[in-house]
Image: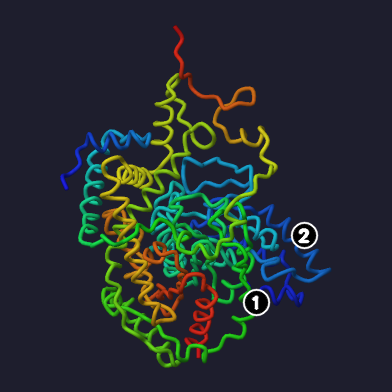
Amino acid sequence: MKELSTDVVKHVAGLARLEIPQGEEATFVNHMNKVLSYVELLSEVDTKDAEPFFSPAKEHLEYYTEEFATHQDKVRPSLGADEVLKNAPSKQQNQFAVEAVIEEN
Amino acid sequence: MNIYESHNLLKSKKISATELTKEALTKAETSKTNAIITLTSDLALRRAKEADKEISSKGPKGWLHGVPFTLKDLFITKNIRTTAGSKILFNYIPPYEGYVSRSLSDAGAILIGKVSCDEFGMGSTNENTPFGAVKNPHDVNHVAGGSSGGSAASVAEGSSAFSMGTDTGGSIRLPANFCGLVGFKPTYGRVSRYGQIAYGSSLDQAGPVARNVLDVGCVMEAITQKDPLDVTNVPNKTMKIVGALEKANVKDLKGKVIAYSREFIEACDNDVKSSLYDALKVFESSGAILKETSFPHFKYSVAAYYLIATSEASTNLARYDGIHFGFRDKSMKGNLEQTYIRSRTEGFGEEVRKRIILGTFSLSSGYQDQYFAKACKVRRKIYQDFENAFLEADAIFSPVCASLAFKQGEGKQDPLKMYMNDLYTIPVNLAGLPGLALPFGKHGNLPTGFQLIGKSFQDEELLKLGRAFELASKA
């Protein structure tokens, strides 16, 4: 496949809410292209009849009981607000504090 | 200090949990490996005192009662800092308890500390972490291996009798191999992942690093209770294995069919290769039947793995937003979007960012079929290679890594080459099978060993085979 450009890599990084720091662009783009060119190897494999394998759990349903797989709709104790907020970098009045998303006129 | 012997000494009151704990803490405090991120001395001494009280009145309640251990810092521990080896969780103190920590604490084991790992489990050297590289206790110029390097180093240096690691593509087995220990990745689903910080959810599995197979059995009995908080955890499969391991015998190897690929062994460095052939000779002379087998799709496993693992990582690591917990960049006043971006860019290390971006690309619209979906189909082919081999074999013998423990810093130069080191461990995670790394021999200061792979959910059979090999290799 065609090599990815710096702009495409930056765009994908943006989708993941990441920025490629200035000066590191070349390293990142080069790495991405190296890995993508390596994984081209997979195109050799004839997978026409292969069902995608997503999780080992799905291959061994005999070990899972219905009762276990379907959670009962039962109320369990959960963490209190104090505990949930304990690690918040910023909080106000028992809530997570974030930067403003609505601008004032 | 191993678990089984410590247990017997505790039982016969020849040693106390406090003595064992003090000894482990001294080793940890004078350690040259940088294995430990957070030492929990006060808690350990308090728990040891409680254990001594209980043991003196009723005897030990199980194999692990009063036995010191460490936890990879990817396991959530209530009220004890849990960093995942990352700046983004540098000050994170979990408000809840994970399954592994709870079950080991219920078993009476004594937590000595939280140990280092590659950030979020991403790496095979334990150098990818702002907490500094972990060194190999056998030779500090070499790495301990990763990502559970702190686990392996802490056991090898004696600051714990065992440690819990996690294995997504070899992260328990590789450091165990580099540090001369036994590392066990159970079948996917045997150990609950509740409270195990996620990397690749269809691949991640927790397991012990210990001094011998008997000790691995002692730990497995404590961590295989059913846990409804992980829906992929298999119910009603609590392990009962120590009794069988105690009875294990060299004769158990007689008639067992061990499949292996000569091609894989030949691809290893000479020092590793000779040890692998010597191990095969031990199997053969004990009456096992060696069977050359080919695994035609294993050469695709690294490529499939790096698409699948990074795709899963890109979704799992989306939760680190700088808002709910963890590091927040506070320079972008009044801009929420930039706060997310800066916090994540500053908080994650380079390798983690690379993997998130690759995974995001692999899942992005227009590329998903070509990358993620294709990798999952190749994963099926790899699984079928195992199924075919197991039609005629009881276990598969393979290298853990083609080389001895790398030199410090060696991996920084070519990341793709570093990924290739996981070639022999990755197929096991892709298929969800149990894999057991066993130490065997040394080259200079550095340990060598191999891996045995078992059938799905036949972890017990695999451990028995491993124990029989241990006995045979000493005979």
Q: Residue at x 57, y 60 (%)?
A: B28
Foreground residue among B282 and B375: B375
In the image, what residue type sits under mark 1?
Answer: Glu
Residue B431 at least partly seen: yes
Q: Is residue B106 above or below residue B119?
A: below
| Amino acid residing under circle 2 | Glu
Residue B346: % across, % down? 40, 36
Pick the residue in front: B465 or B412.
Answer: B465
Judged left or right of residue B9, residue B315 is left
- Circle 2: element type: helix
Residue designated by label 2: B50
Q: Taking B379 as reference, is A82 above or below it?
A: above
Residue B5: give its label: 1
The quarter of the displayed image where residue B407 is located: bottom left
* Quarter of the image where one finds residue B163: bottom right
Could you say which is closer to the camera, residue B43 or residue B62?
B62
